[in-house]
Amino acid sequence: MKCVYVCGYGRSGSTLAGRMLSAQSGHVAVGEATHVGSDSFLATAHCACGRKYPTCGYWAAVDRCLTAAAGPTALSRRARIFLEGLPGLIVPLTLLRRLVLRISFSDRYPQNSFADGVRLLTAVSGGGFVDISKTTRSTANRPRLLAASGMNVELHLAWLPLRRVVRSRQAAAIRQGRSASRGMAVVSVVTGRMLAHVAARRCAQSLRSSLPRVDLDEFIRLAAHVSEIDEQLNHMIAGNRSRRHGIDAQGE
C-alpha cells in the first residue's frame, strides 16, 4: 500500500502537484483525503469529475466499502483530531501504530478505525493514492498516521515563492468576500508556511524519508500531457477549483 503525500502550506500549488504526481505514479489523486468522511464537508463536496460525493463512481465505491465495514473504535473524535494535528507530532511512531487501530477514521464512518479506513481507501484506489492534505496546523501529523497504518508514504513538498503564495491568498480572500489586506496576508502566509514546513521536515525525519521540493513550474509545462488520464486518476474532492477546468499556477 502506497501513499504519495504532498506536504507544505496551502496556496502553494498542491492541487497541480497532486495531479502530476498521480500521473507519474499511476495512483488515484483523491485531493485532501482528510476530508473523506466529514459530513459537513461532503454535504457540498464535488469530485474533480464534476459529480457530487458519492455519486461519482470512485467515491461511491469508497462509500460502500467504508459503510459496510464494522468494528467500533474506542477513542473519541477529539483524540483523532489531536493526533492528526500539530500536537500529534510529539507522539512516538511506535505508539501511533497502536493508536491508529483505536481512533475512528472519520465522523461519517466512525465504525472504522483509522487504519481500516486507510486500508479500504487504498484497496478501492487499486493499491495507492495521492493525498494533498498538506502539513498545516490541523493535518501536520497526517503523514505519520498514514505510515503508522501500514502505508509506504512518499513525501513531496509543495513550494512557491512567497510573493506568489501571498498573491494567491489575497485572490482567494477576494473571491470569498473577506479582507484582502496584503499586510495581513503576508503575516498569515509567513507564519503558516513556516509551521507547515517545520511539520513536513519533522514527518520526513520521523519516517526516514526524503522531502523533495516540487518544481511547480516544471509541472505546469508538463500539465498538458495529463488531461487524457484525468478522468481515470483524478478524483480530488478538495483543492483549487481549477482542478476540473484547467490549471491555476498560483493556487492551491
Image (tube, rainbow, N blue to C red):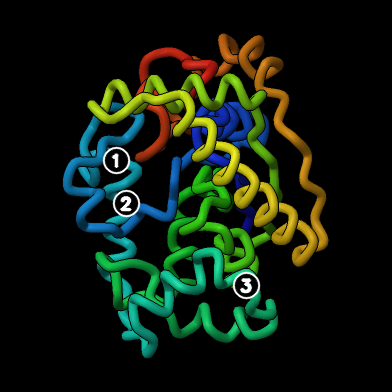
Q: Is residue 21 above or below residue 68?
A: above
Residue, disc 1:
57
Q: Which amino acid does label 1 sit on?
A: Gly
Q: Is mark 2 on a helix, strand or loop?
A: helix
Q: Which of 26 and 91 is in front in this view?
A: 91
Q: Is 188 on the left or on the right of 37, as rendered?
A: right
In this rendering, which labeled residue sits more in front, label 3 or label 2?
A: 3
For the residues labelled 3 and 1, the Cα–Cα distance comes to 29 Å
Q: What residue type is labelled 2?
A: Ala
Tally of numbered tags? 3
Q: Is mark 1 on a helix, strand or loop?
A: helix
Lower position in the chain sequence, tag 3 or tag 1: 1
Label disc, if present, on residue 148 of the rendered structure: 3
- Quarter of the picture holding the N terminus: bottom right
Q: How crowded is mark 2: few (under 14 residues within 10 Å), some or many (20 or more)?
A: some
Circles 1 and 2: CB atoms closer than 8 Å: yes
For the residues labelled 1 and 2, the Cα–Cα distance comes to 6 Å
Query: Where residue 130 sits in the image (x, y, percent)?
Result: 55, 43
Q: What residue type is labelled 3?
A: Ala
Residue, disc 2:
61
